[in-house]
Amino acid sequence: MASSAEQMRNYKGPALFSFGFRPFFLAGAIMAAITPLATALALAGAVAIEIPGGIIAWHGHEMVYGYLSAVIAGFILTAVPNWTGRLPLMGPRLVALAALWAAGRVAMLASGMVGAGAAGLIDVAFLFVLDLFLWREVIAGKNWRNAPVCVLVFFLAVGNLIWHAEIMQGSAGVFGLHFGIGVVAILLALIGGRVTPSFTRNWLAKIGKEPISVPFSMFDKLAIGALIIAISLWVFAPHLQATGLVLLVAGLMHFIRLARWRGWRAFAEPLVVILHVGYFWLAAGIALLGVSTIAPSILPAANALHALTAGAMGVMTLAVMTRATLGHTGRALRADAATIVIYALVNLGALIRVAAPLLPMPYADAMVLASFGWGGAFAVFAFVYGRYLLTPRIVS
């Protein structure tokens, strides 16, 4: 059987479908750029988007089960060959999977015409099909270490199914949305906890500095366990004071976990330090959810939630998307000016969204500004990195 490298050399189709990260990073970036702006315009009455559950429900769903699901798919499909030693998904099969994701986006926009049930059937198929592929690869490659990722993708698919069931019953889909956000938060802790210290160690070794040595330990297991418990309480019992306390404890543990990786030593390399910034947002988002649960008058729940979504998930996905795109298209792992702009915009947009009630401007104006900043980061990615994703790998 041909190796992955040989298969890549023999591939004759469009570069966009030569590896999983290409279509899904580009599609996810476009989705992330458009959705916040479309939502802001719809709320302002400038455009009409008629969807069961309302524009806010559509916004939340498309950010979690649209954009985030695409980026997660792109990352995992690219990582699977390294995990299992098997050939990557490419060509017609990758086209079919990307088309299934796109069909879900169209179905969501057309749900007012085709009905919530039909739209839901089309939309939920993507994550279940993706998970079946992942399980097949993990089982065939006997790569049981990554079975938890398959389990989490399955739960993400279940969360999407729950969201659609809620919408069909006339609710706003809050439980299904929170379920999905919780699953993604755990995925970030699991995968971010691998790549962040690993890339930090590799970069320090590359420049001749003493690399960090922080192997996965019992503390990491306890931190992830505390996060699972905290997220579960937040999803199923969000108003309990005990939930807020557990969230605070979990947030503190992840701050400690982050500090152990000593990201300040990699401050000179944006491609590395942005991973630490993204993980900081994760720990902060968990802790702020705890604050909003215990004292909602001090911090509204929506603002705390956006520290986790716009902050942790937005920053961490762009950190992975930029680095993976550069590396897998044969380019130098170096952050150029456009990449710095991407990182600055996504963090600025998240900060404005979280701090909106405290800013000296109308809340609606702050929302629009946050949408332009955060969505603008993904627009710049789609414009600049889209060229890399659409063209063949550079051969050195």
Image: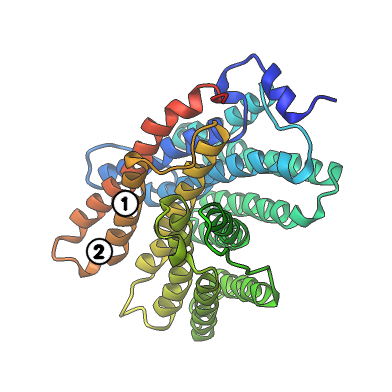
Residue count near mark 2 (Cα–Cα under 10 Å), binned few <14, some 14–19, many ≥20: many
Label 2 element class = helix
Give the residue at mark 2.
Answer: 356
Q: Is residue 358 left or right of residue 177?
A: left
Give the residue at mark 1.
Answer: 344
Q: In which quarter of the image is the C terminus?
A: top right
Q: Which of marks 2 and 1 is nearer the N terminus?
A: 1
Q: Vertical placement of 351 versus 330: above or below?
A: below
Tell us which disc is closer to us: 2 or 1. Answer: 1
How far from the left and from the top, in percent, is residue 282? 48, 65
Which one is in front, 207 or 241?
Answer: 207
How far from the left and from the top, in percent, is residue 28? 48, 39
Quadrant in which residue 176 is drawn: bottom right
Which one is in front, 22 or 263?
Answer: 263
Which one is in front, 128 or 45?
Answer: 128
Q: Quadrant of the N terminus?
A: top right
Q: Is residue 391 visible?
A: yes
Q: Can residue 53 be seen in this view?
A: no
Q: Distance between the residues labelled 2 and 1?
A: 18 Å
How far from the left and from the top, in percent, is residue 265? 46, 65
Verify CB contact (< 8 Å) between mark 2 and mark 1: no
Q: Is residue 274 left or right of residue 345?
A: right
